[in-house]
Image (cartoon, rainbow, N blue to C red):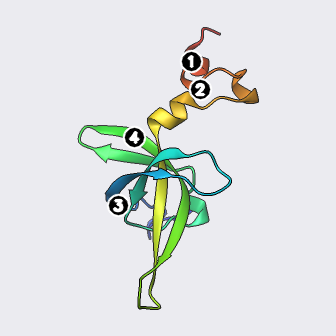
Amino acid sequence: MNTTGNGEPAQPKGYVTRMRLDDRPGWRPVRAYELDMPAPPDVSGSPLFCPHPLEVVGVVYREQDITVPDSERVIGYAYSHHLTTLRAARGRATGNVPLAEHLARDV
């Protein structure tokens, strides 16, 4: 885990640069936030917060490196799942019902 000099967890700050469809080959297309910062491996799974009002709006899941045309400069952008994508996720772990429905069930 990245920490600050005083041992507190690091809280990188950045901006959503755009909403986009992450449609890489071999993966189901998903709505995603593109962030203006890289996402090293220990950042994947971290919440993406909107500061006003303070709320979770997504979860970081990958990084994409882009080479600037006519340059050797490489820029890393992080991607974050939009919460609507996560709420609709389903699979064996959720009994094949949407995650939001699975979490809202009475236990």
Q: Position of residue 50 (x, y in %)?
A: 31, 45
What is the quadrant of residue 91 in the picture?
A: top right
The residue carrying mark 1 is: 101
25 relative to 86 in the view: left or right: right
68 relative to 104 in the view: left or right: left
Query: In percent of the image, x 42 and y 82: which residue is there?
Result: 68
Q: Which labelled disc corresponds to residue 99?
A: 2
Who comes first in sequence, dot 1 or dot 4? 4
Who comes first in sequence, dot 1 or dot 3? 3
Quadrant of the drawing holding the C terminus: top right
Q: Amino acid at mark 1?
A: Glu
Kindly report the distance in space between the C-alpha atoms of the residues bearing marks 1 and 4.
18 Å
Who comes first in sequence, dot 4 or dot 3? 3
From the viewer's perspective, is the residue at label 1 or at label 3 nearer?
1
The crowd level at tag 1 (other Cα within 10 Å; few <14, some 14-19, many 20+) is few
Please indicate, yes or no, whether residue 69 appears anywhere in the rendered image: yes
The residue carrying mark 4 is: 57
Q: Which labelled disc corresponds to residue 13?
A: 3
* Residue with the most extreme left position: 52
Q: Amino acid at mark 2?
A: Leu
Report the front residue among 27 and 10: 27
